[in-house]
Amino acid sequence: MIQSRMIIRYWLPPIVWMIFISPLNSLLTSRETSSLVLPFISWLMPHLTPDVKAALHIVFRKTGHFLGYAFLALLLFRAFRGGSRTFRFSSFLFAGLISFGYAALDEYLQTFIPARTGSFYDWLIDAFGIATALIILAWRSKKQ
């Protein structure tokens, strides 16, 4: 019973998050987000030119890449630690490897979805988010 609670508590969040950010969730394509984000930007800042609004839309999407994979790395690190307070390099390493690999798989699989495109640059943004999250984790662990 305790083992199943541990699995649900620590492993369910990263699994659900991976499903949420997977390429199968094609609702968040550029066209789809533009129909949501651009009207909001126009309402919030009506004085902006269309080019600036388009640039803000790109920043919004790329920030989503960064934060989405940073959060995945944090969830995986937490899962590998399994409630332990001690910093284990293996938790850090496996969280990073799985996050980097999943980001690469995500971008690769997007090449097979007509409304999506896989991009090495998006993977770099994902990787930067992962690395940033893991560096912050390592830094916080050293402080404690």
Image (cartoon, helix red, strand yellow):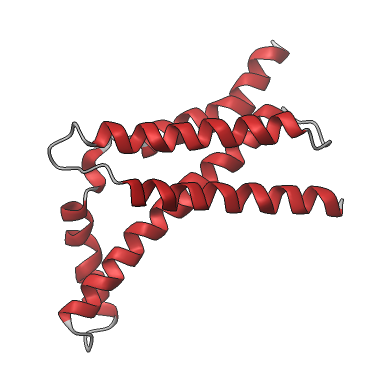
Residue 33 sits in which quadrant? bottom left
Q: In this view, does 87 lie to the left or right of 116?
A: right
Instruction: Tell me how many marks there are.
Output: 0
Furthest-left residue in this view = 114
**In terms of depth relative to the viewer, which is nearer, 106 or 42?**
106
Instruction: Point out residue 87 in the picture as x, y percentages from the top left corner.
Output: 80, 37
Furthest-bottom residue in this view = 47
Give the residue displayed 34% in from the left and 46% down from the top: 120
Residue 110 sits in which quadrant? top left
Furthest-right residue in this view = 144
Give the residue displayed 66% in from the left and 33% down from the top: 93
Residue 78 appearing in the image: no
Instruction: Point out residue 102 in the picture as x, y percentages from the top left corner.
Output: 44, 32
Give the residue displayed 32% in from the left and 58% down from the top: 61
Residue 59 appearing in the image: yes
Instruction: Point out residue 118 in the picture as x, y percentages from the top left corner.
Output: 26, 42
Give the residue displayed 51% in from the left and 52% down from the top: 129
Q: In the rendered image of this protein, does residue 110 appear above or below residue 5? A: below
Q: Locate the N terminus and report the quarter of the image it occupies.
A: top right
Residue 94 sits in which quadrant? top right
Instruction: Point out residue 53 in the picture as x, y percentages from the top left corner.
Output: 23, 75
Q: Is residue 30 left or right of residue 66?
A: left
Furthest-top residue in this view = 1
Q: In the rendered image of this protein, does residue 51 appear above or below residue 73? A: below
Q: In the rendered image of this protein, does residue 106 appear above or below residue 66? A: above
**In terms of depth relative to the viewer, which is nearer, 21 or 42?**
21
Q: Is residue 121 left or right of residue 27?
A: right
